[in-house]
Image: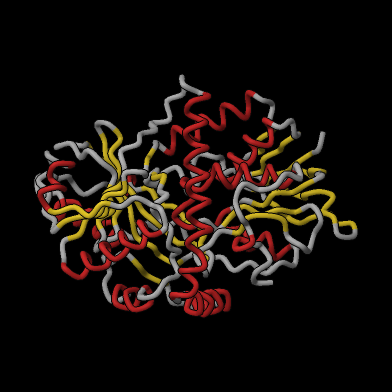
């Protein structure tokens, strides 16, 4: 039985452990935290095959520069003298092209559709588990003509690539959201999208893994690796050494630092997001993205989560209430009947999304070492792409043909 050590107990690491344990691997998960504060727990929980365009795309640079001028805007880069930040920004700029988008779409689409199918399989296999999984689609809501043009153009692109998208009038949006007093010009509806409750999913996976005998080591910091030739023999941590036949690095934002210990160049920065939960009154029915505000909205029964912002930073300790204010203000601007109090600071969740400069994840073996794989860099798509990533890494370890093409996600593409 091969020993696999997974560095990172976020949603990617947990799903990888889940599929590996199903195939009989001896799995150990090392996490620098306690598995209750991972990036995915407080996110929107969206499963979005509609998201076929990478973060690095034409027009995003101009919008980003404009947003930098506002303290409540959805995007901000903390200016600092940092070689990694400069390198990341230059690589992002080079990737924000139409050619890169056209190249990336088939890869992201296939990965997303595969991931959703795995979620449906998971729900079928564990019918008693309450994951909060619902197939209610996703609304992209807009208030301005400029945003309408962009979203309708994207709907045409999505339909062209086999992702169903319906352009809705204001009245048609009201039919899908009859209670919240929609104050929008219109929207685009993606009926194939879904959502679930991320913290319930996290708890379910931990229970399943520990029930199967997977060893989970919390608050373990990776210090180094024991290397022989082209093989990593063990992971050295402050809680002991873990001998390994294979090592999977799924450490989120910190994957780039771990990769550096293995002499692999993997540009990665943290994209900080915030969210808060409030009572869902009057009831919002469907997940949505408020396009101009870049705010995600997810109803979970009698509560609803609002989340957003992309602060490029590696600091997750400080809560920037101005960014939270931007999210809060958007709620009543789009949902005219919806009013909620500004959340207390202690009720605001924040997390660092692992962002690659080209907007594509790193998935697969690295050529530098014979037994090291990566599953990281999913940006805002961690929940959405986690099952597919874990399953694909398992298939690679078993020398099976991967279900989707992975070359665009090579961990070595910047080395």
Q: Quadrant of residue 177?
A: top left
Q: In this view of the protein, which residue sits in the foreground, 289 or 221? A: 289
Q: How is the image coloured?
A: secondary structure
Residue that lies at the very extreme toward the top in this rendered image: 128
Residue drawn at 69 percent across, 26 percent down:
213
Q: How many marks?
A: 0
Q: Nearer the viewer, residue 248 or 254?
A: 248
Quick check: 161 above or below 275? below
Q: In which quadrant will I find the C terminus?
A: bottom right
In this rendering, position of residue 74 left or right of residue 316: left
Residue 247 located left or right of residue 47: right
Q: Position of residue 161 (x, y in %)?
A: 42, 58
Above or below, 325 against 199 in this view is: below
Q: Position of 339 compared to 23: left or right?
A: left
Residue 302 in percent (x, y) is at 24, 31
Residue 387, image quadrant? top right
Measuring 53% from the left and 62% from the top, which residue is drawn there? Answer: 360
Residue 72 percent coordinates (x, y): 26, 65
- Quadrant of the image occupied by residue 29: top right
The front one of 87 and 19 is: 19
Residue 306 visible to an observer of this rendering: no
Residue 284 in view (yes/no): yes
Determine the residue positioned at 40% across, 43% down.
45
Where residue 144 sits in the image (x, y, percent)?
A: 16, 66
Specify the quadrant that holds the N terminus.
top right
Tell me which residue sits at (14%, 47%) in the image: 172
């Amino acid at each position: 039985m091969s020993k696999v050590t997974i560095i990172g107990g976020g949603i990617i690491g947990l799903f990888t452990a889940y599929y590996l344990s199903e195939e009989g691997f001896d799995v150990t998960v090392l996490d620098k935290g306690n598995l209750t504060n991972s990036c995915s727990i407080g996110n929107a929980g969206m499963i979005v095959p509609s998201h076929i365009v990478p973060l690095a795309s034409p027009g995003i640079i101009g919008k980003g520069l404009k947003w930098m001028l506002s303290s409540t805007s959805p995007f901000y880069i903390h200016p600092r003298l940092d070689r990694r930040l400069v390198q990341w920004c230059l690589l992002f700029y080079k990737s924000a092209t139409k050619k890169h988008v056209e190249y990336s779409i088939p890869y992201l689409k296939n990965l997303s559709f595969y991931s959703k199918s795995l979620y449906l399989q998971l729900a079928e296999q564990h019918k008693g588990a309450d994951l909060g999984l619902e197939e209610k689609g996703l609304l992209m809501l807009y208030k301005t003509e400029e945003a309408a043009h962009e979203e309708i153009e994207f709907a045409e692109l999505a339909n062209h690539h086999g992702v169903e998208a319906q352009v809705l009038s204001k009245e048609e949006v009201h039919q899908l959201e009859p209670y919240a007093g929609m104050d929008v010009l219109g929207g685009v509806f993606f009926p194939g999208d879904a959502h679930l409750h991320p913290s319930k999913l996290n708890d379910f996976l931990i229970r399943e893994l520990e029930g199967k005998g997977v060893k989970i080591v919390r608050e373990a910091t990776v210090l180094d690796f024991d290397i022989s030739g082209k093989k990593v023999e063990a992971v050295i941590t402050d809680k002991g050494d873990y001998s390994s036949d294979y090592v999977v690095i799924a450490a989120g934002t910190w994957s780039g630092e771990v990769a550096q210990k293995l002499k692999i160049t993997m540009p990665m920065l943290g994209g900080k997001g915030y969210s808060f939960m409030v009572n869902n009154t009057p009831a919002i029915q469907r997940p949505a993205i408020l396009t101009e505000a870049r705010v995600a909205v997810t109803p979970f029964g009698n509560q609803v989560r609002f989340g957003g912002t992309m602060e490029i930073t590696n600091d997750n300790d400080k809560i920037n209430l101005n960014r939270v204010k931007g999210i809060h203000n958007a709620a009543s601007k789009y949902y005219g009947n919806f009013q909620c109090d500004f959340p207390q600071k202690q009720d605001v969740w924040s997390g660092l999304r692992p962002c690659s400069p080209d907007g594509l994840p790193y998935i697969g073996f690295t050529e530098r070492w014979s037994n090291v794989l990566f599953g990281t860099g999913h940006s805002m798509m961690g929940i959405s792409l986690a099952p597919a990533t874990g399953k694909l890494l398992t298939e690679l370890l078993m020398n099976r043909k991967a279900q989707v093409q992975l070359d665009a996600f090579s961990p070595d593409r910047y080395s």
